[in-house]
Amino acid sequence: MTTDAIDIEALVKTIAIDARESSLILANAPTEQKNQSILRLAELIEENVDSLREENAKDLAAAEDNGITQAMLKRLELSDRMISDMVAGARQVAALPDPLGQLLETYDHPQGFKIEKVSVPIGVIGIIYESRPNVTIDCAILCLKSGNASILRGGKEAYHTNIALAKLVTQALEESGLPEKASQFIPTKDRAALNTLLKLNQQVQCIIPRGGEGLIRFVSENSHIPVIKHYDGICTLYADKSLNVEQAKNVIVNSKCQKPGVCNAAENLLIHKEAAPEALPVIAQALKDEGVELRADQSAKSILDNHGIESHPATDEDWSTEYLDLILSVKVVDSIEDAIAFINKYGSSHSDCILTTDTSAAECFLNGVDSATVYWNVSTRFTDGFEFGFGAEIGISTDKLHARGPMGLRELCTYKYKIVGDGQIRS
């Protein structure tokens, strides 16, 4: 082991120890003090926009030199929209009820004592993420409000931006009298830091990876700490035989094109065989106008060819590919049952949508698709903590244990039992 590796290991262990100590204090911090810190952070972001953009420019320049795709570059850019969303998200989280100390259940024991189940923080949460710098703020404020200490490990692409944002988080904590180590960013690009963090199960209670499948699989396979994850965002839209073509077209284009490099963007389009001859050319042309490459099965390609709309033959691999780009796979299906079976086979249990005017078909789809979020005539782009009213999200879970879908404040809590009596003993 090199000296650098030893130093990194010591650094990460110290961060984890400090986080654990801070978490015990933060767990009992008054709601008003936590809110004060979050609101101050929003002010600091607004006050430091110019310096944040200077740091972000360094990351953007390095990313371009490394040949990053335009879709990924957009995720990295600290745009006006991203800054305003971070500020708005912080203020929204501060305005939300404190999730801690909530009485979840109560039971009066026959021997006269009371059992109460109450919400408490998880403890120390490690978040490992790529590209998008707003994740630094989203995770810091959600962990802070829910009484959890956070250890943030951002991707090398946004290193300078993340460091600058993390400093503002530390300043807000200090100014509000909360432990400055309650939120820490690991200040190195070396992967050895991640390897060390994943083994610190005595100090860290939960790991949440946000990024590509490679990162998430690496974390899941190497972590000694429980992991909440989603591997892919393979989201599918199903255009039913009973649909409003114009409405469906708008939802499909938005789901694919509004921000293609994110996990809630659509990757597959299924269309019922009875609707395909009329609806598919209209929808496909709108997608082509937005620069989308279509990969179609034989039936869909035949329809598109007849209307002079370019497409490429789809392979079986395409149905389970997260493109994160302006590419969409298209397939004609015989029935809604086939659509549901397709999604449950090829999807990633993230976000899937039916486009229909038939209530019975919609209910069949919503009940039959085994995904964290299912939509009826609504863009999949709404799978987002901010859009769900959570203020922000710490991730979108496709797991079924503990949390599923966008994870807000309540999903960052666990519970414990408080038992109060008067000397009762068990016979």
Image (cartoon, grey):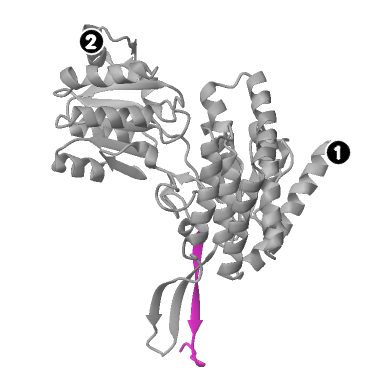
Q: Nearer the viewer, residue 351 or 144?
A: 144
Residue beneath the point at 70% across and 42% down: 163
Residue that badge 2 annotates:
302
Residue 17 seen in the current view: yes
Q: Residue furthest right?
A: 3
How many residues crowd mark 1 within 10 Å: few (<14), some (14–19), many (20+)?
few
The quarter of the picture where the N terminus appears is top right
Residue 413 falls inside the magenta stretch:
yes
Magenta stretch bounds: 412-427
Residue beneath the point at 61% across and 67% down: 33
Count of numbered badges drawn on the protein: 2
Identified by mark 1, the residue type is Thr
Taking 231 as reference, is 291 left or right?
left
Q: Nearer the viewer, residue 377 or 204?
A: 377
Residue beneath the point at 50% across and 78% down: 418
Taking 69 as reference, is 405 left or right?
left
Residue beneath the point at 38% across and 18% down: 292
State the mark number for residue 3.
1
Taking 292 as reference, is 279 left or right?
left
